[in-house]
Image: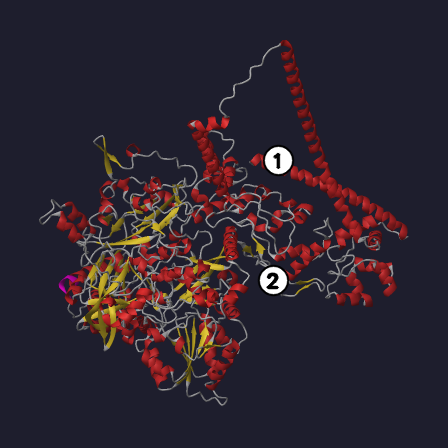
Amino acid sequence: MSSNKKYWKSVGELDQSNSEALETLKQKEFVEEIPVDEFLGNDDTMESSSTTRRDFLKYVGFSTAAATLAACEGPVVKSIPYVVKPQEIVPGVANYYATTIANGFDFASVLVKTREGRPIKIENNDLANSGANARVNASVLDLYDNLRLKAPKKDGKTITWDAFDAAIKAELNKYKTAADGTLSSKAIVLLTQTFASPSTNKLIAEFKATYGNVRHVVYDAVSQSAALDAYQQMYGERALANYDFSKADTIVSVGADFLGDWQGGGFDSGYAKGRVPKKGKMSRHIQFESNMTLSGANADKRVPLTPTQQKIALAKIYAKVMGTSVGGQLPANVDKAVNATVAEIIKAGSKAVVVSGIQDVDAQLLVLAINTKISSKAFDVTSPIKTRQGNDAAVAELITDMKAGKVGALIMSGVNPMYTLANNADFKAGLEKTVSVSFSMKDDETASISNYVAAAPHYLESWGDVELTKGNYGLMQPAIRPLFDTRQFQDALLLWNDNSTSYHDYIKSNWKTNILATASWGTALHDGVYNTRPFASVAIIDEDVLAAQSAIANAAASKLSKASVEGMELSLYTKTGMGDGQQANNPWLQEFPDPLTRTTWDNYLTVSAADAEALGLENYNVADGGLNGNYVNLTVNGTTLKNVPALIQPGQAKGSVGLSFGYGRKLGLKTEMQTGVNAYTLYNNFKDVQAVKIEKTNGVHEFACIQLQNTLMGRGDIIRETTLEVFNTKDKEYWNPIPKVSLNHQETPVTSPDVDLWESFDRSVGHHFNLSIDLNACTGCGACVVACHAENNVPVVGKEEMRKSRDMHWLRIDRYYSSEETFAGDDHKKESMSGLWGDKGSLGGFGEMENPSENPQVAFQPIMCQHCNHAPCETVCPVAATSHGRQGQNHMAYNRCVGTRYCANNCPYKVRRFNWFLYAENDEFDFHMNDDLGRMVINPDVTVRSRGVMEKCSMCIQMTQKTILDAKRDGKVVEPNAFKTACSAACSSGAMTFGDVNDNKNDIAALKDDNRAYHLLESVGTKPNVVYQVKVRNTTES
Amino acid sequence: MKESYQNSENNSTKDMKQVIHRKLGLKKLFLGLFFISALFSFSQEGDATAGKALFNSNCAACHKLDKKMTGPALRNVESRLAEEQGLDREWLYAWVKNSSAVIKSGDAYGNKIYAEYNKSAMTAFPQLSNADIDNILAYTAAEAPKKSEATVTPTQSGASNNTSGGVSNTILLLALVVLFGLLAAGLFMVNKTLRRFADEKGIVIEEKEKGKSLWKAFVQNQFLILVTAIFFLLASGYFVYGYLMQVGVDQGYQPVQPIHFSHKIHAGDNKIDCKYCHSSARVSKTSGIPSLNVCMNCHKSISEYNGETTAEYNKDFYDKQIEELYKAVGWDDANQAYTGVTKPVEWVRIHNLPDFAYFNHSQHVSVAGVECQTCHGPVQDMEIVEQFAPLTMGWCINCHRDTGLKIKGNDYYKKIHDQLTAKYGDLNKITVAQMGGLECGKCHY
């Protein structure tokens, strides 16, 4: 039986009402007439055309062939030499200049590496007291920011400097003191960053003298005003006490992240010196804090407590050190910790030091009093820190005056109050009543609403001087001619003062008359630093002053001990990677993983696990491994910050939450860089602690967190730890054993040649490089990560790729939390597991161990390619693209790599990185490598990798080769400790030591055979050339 | 590879020397004739030949005969001064020996000249005797050479050069052809005679039976076909491989440059050391294209070409190139001053290593003492520079395998050499490869 199947072409056919249209559709394939006739229908033109079909095909064929042939030719490369070559430049040879960064938040004396006149890297200046942090290392990329202001503007329109000068001069003259001596009713206000510059101060004083009614208001976005006020009250000078932690045996910090940005930072090198056990001794560090900070992570003992509790704890410490008592209630365990701490301070005496980051004048007074009382050797008030000068009261007064119309002209430099002020609405209202001039590198939130915007140069294009600490100076000199039509604030001041000298000459003459005395200007400029006052511990102050001080401090203590708060407390902090947010358009910093949360491209609310549970907040990993979290709304004093992602932070004090500054900017940034939320909106009255109301909202946030495993799972072999007591009393075999394997049923050390599959090459002749990483000295600051980025042209991949774990960092700093109270507890728990189920079962046990403890121990471990002498990656490469050099480096020939990724799979350290995409000159990755300006930062000695090849740490072979080649060229033996890698050179804490182990004069030769030395995953038998030093904790409880 | 190259280098230097020798000979003859005629036409005392030497060593830095430079043109200076200014030879003696004294004395013409030439006084030459000055004046009084004569000489020498090489080859070949012809004829004759003998003796020469044709036999023999197929496949594989290996190798690349800079004139004829201009080759990884101020070290005083020329590259052509240089660097030759308007020269780069290969000139030039010509070829003979070496990795490596380190006098190597000799006994040669010169990471990072 046949069936009459009917096939429908569309559902429309069921509807008979438009059958006519359907019928036409059936007949015609194309609904609309194809306009063939237009070009074929006209017979006349067709016939008159001389081109036949055959000719046409001939032409097509010929042009295709011609194009193919033309494409075969190599590109013509042009070389354009100088017309007149500057004498100091030799193409291909780098020049170094000493300069100083002073952007209002970061102050450091650095060296700038330039190639053919382009600054390409920031390095540490060994003559300076402190090193460059991650942000300073990344600052060179800000120079090549394509969104920089390129010329001055008036009301949003580009004008010339001549027009700008004329207009400003006219405005200023309106408020100039009249000829008869009457002051103008409206003031001229200079609202600036902290310059800490003697020459700028002199200039501003001259400006005041010229115009009369002039006020200078210094504004730090992240205020240290309370500490400054306290210091001023005690010592009569607006500065911050200086500390040298290498001189302290006991370090007590109450809420001071002194390894972060506390008091401008730069304390880590001193701290690290005291942390390396020498002659059985190392410093002991006790940290009281609410957010988990770098300092807390490095502490021997960390006590989590809310900001209010910190105040009470500090008051109690003060009282007990002074031998008095104050009220105030603390939880029993905290009270016990406070008592124990006081006992340790008293025992250490002058070798103890107490610091605090509580932004409260009373708290800061107490700290000064305690350190004076114990005459701490680590405490210095003779050369205090000058790099924070901001005055909250003056800023608040300025805003009131602006709104009252008392300010005629407001000239801003290095500040962005529209972004950094919580009451920016008030500021805006005031700004509308004045003539505003903004010196800015970006068309940022403030510049975009200012009447006049002066394009300011980067510090690498500017002259300047900085008084870092009293009597210790840094000089800033340009390393490149201004890229754009910019002018620095000081040059403008000179012009307004009718002074025709350049700022360069001005500094020079000021230094010659006021600073240098008999010293040479040339030497100072060459060195970049000029130090007249060495660190001096506190002088004994006479009894009367001491009595007066303690009276003030006693009052402060009783006030402080009464501190109380309702509900949750929000601690606002600065992230290691972003600081105050002025470098937000820097892709290196956006992609820099936070040392603690390991999260990139974001800021977030850090919540303790207990509070998160109470609020119903969750963090969980999705199928692709990415970390997701909930959003919350934060309400502080009536202001609500919406959709803040919440991240559960182990170690966060219960009852407190943390949020970092620096994010949530919108103007002057590429779209990709507009990340996070603006915490400044909650920064009421410049108080970094605020009472906050938290409510969960809808939506799921996708974090770009690059370390998803938080704990070591009891694998103490990876980060070896011991306590100082064990280290001092037991044999190396006890706390740093070499793994054993079985050979003929005998325990044989894995390092023995008998158990080795491979025959080793003779590496005793020539150079053999090793890198030592001291886990005691490493603070996790991440300067090495950015230095590696800059040196090796590591690409930026963006948030989406980071979330997929496709980060390209050659050097990462793994951070681990303990699951029990300590890592030793983890090891013990793993050891005592038996069976699968039950109390001690491994199934449940390992599940528990994935979760960090409430107040965990933290360990940092920098990991790069381990350059194994018996490298597993080398043997599996089908094209021999990765091979071993005699000098110990594992080479990677990019041009040979075909991208099988076998090597990455066979690497036990997960240090190989695959180029999933072309990251340079690709619009999909619109970061610095996608524009001509940003590419100027590329190191010409290192290949820019293309898509589909593997890359990894090369142990900076371009740097070791450079040292060798220079020695050969000069016919000299390589100097001791001359070999450096980018990371070891950037490490100001001395954790990384690099060198040639075949030369005993190098530090590394001894470090390699140190008792603390061990190799990562030694039992695998890879024989790495990177050696770690066992972490020793100064704790009694092991 | 290397040996054959060295031969060619030797040949080329020999050739070069010959050419120069011949040229000098002709020039001397020409000059001699010229001066004899000059002596007849001017009955002045002084030796123009000695004068020329003196002029070149003392005056040429600032003066030319026919062209204003730092100082005025000096052709017929004596007669000109005598006619126009009424100054005699005594005045010239005084001026040359100490011009500033003449200016100080208030001499009218002296001051006029001083003002005209940017108030830069002429260097005093107290070491020149009156006789010396007479000689120089004799030289300046010589008549300008006629252009036509100058161009003829080199073409002649070029022509004679070409023929000398060709003749011997042809003769050799002809002799060979004749020899082979005689041999063939001899064989034919022998064969013919033998056959005749055989006929006479009645011996029947067996004719081979006509079997299958060779072609058919071949087609039916599968083994042969297989072998041939394999052979053709291998052969074509070899050629395809050879062709593909040529991709990206620009040996012989000879682009047209914006200024026709002749290395032959600079490095060859004038024997300027390569590293005088490419100075960064000593210290840097790049040899550097010299900046234009380096050119001007010489070309401030050399504004025209007076050397050997050919029909294609004549004096006008070269002079135009110097003008191009002046335009680029912003030099106003007439006023002897920089205008400040520059136009950097966009040279076409000839030697392009890919980005992933690291090459350091200073290591090869300063440390190893490798001659520039080893890699760049006989640049001193190149009118237009071309890429001489293939610049392939195999080419680099072959050299690294053979070349010994230059250990002597280098303290860096001394230590390693001592260590190695302590270990392996006396080593007479350590090659670059033995020092790790073949490791990937030494050139790729």
Where, quadrant-wise, is the N terminus of chain A in this rendering?
bottom left
Instruction: Check the residue under mark 1 and report the chain it is in.
Output: B
Q: Is residue A858 left or right of residue A770?
A: left
Residue at the farthest front position: A1
Residue at the farthest left position: A838
Mark 2 Cα within 10 Å, few/some/many (few <14, many 20+)? some
Under mark 1, the amino acid is Asn
A402 is higher (above) or lower (below) than B57: below
**Measuring 58% from the left and 55% from the top, which residue is drawn there?**
B347
Give how far across and how far down residue B170 sits, in percent: 70, 33
Q: What range of the chain is rendered magenta?
A: A330-334
Rendering quarter of residue A781: bottom left
Q: Secondary structure at mark 2?
A: loop
Q: Is residue A236 left or right of residue B94?
A: left
Mark 1 Cα within 10 Å, few/some/many (few <14, many 20+)? few
Give how far across and how far down residue A949 sits, in percent: 38, 49
Colour basis: secondary structure
Q: Secondary structure at mark 1?
A: helix
**Residue where numbered disc 2 is placed:** B343
Instruction: Check the residue under mark 2 and report the chain it is in.
Output: B
**Residue where numbered disc 1 is placed:** B7
Rendering quarter of residue A782: bottom left
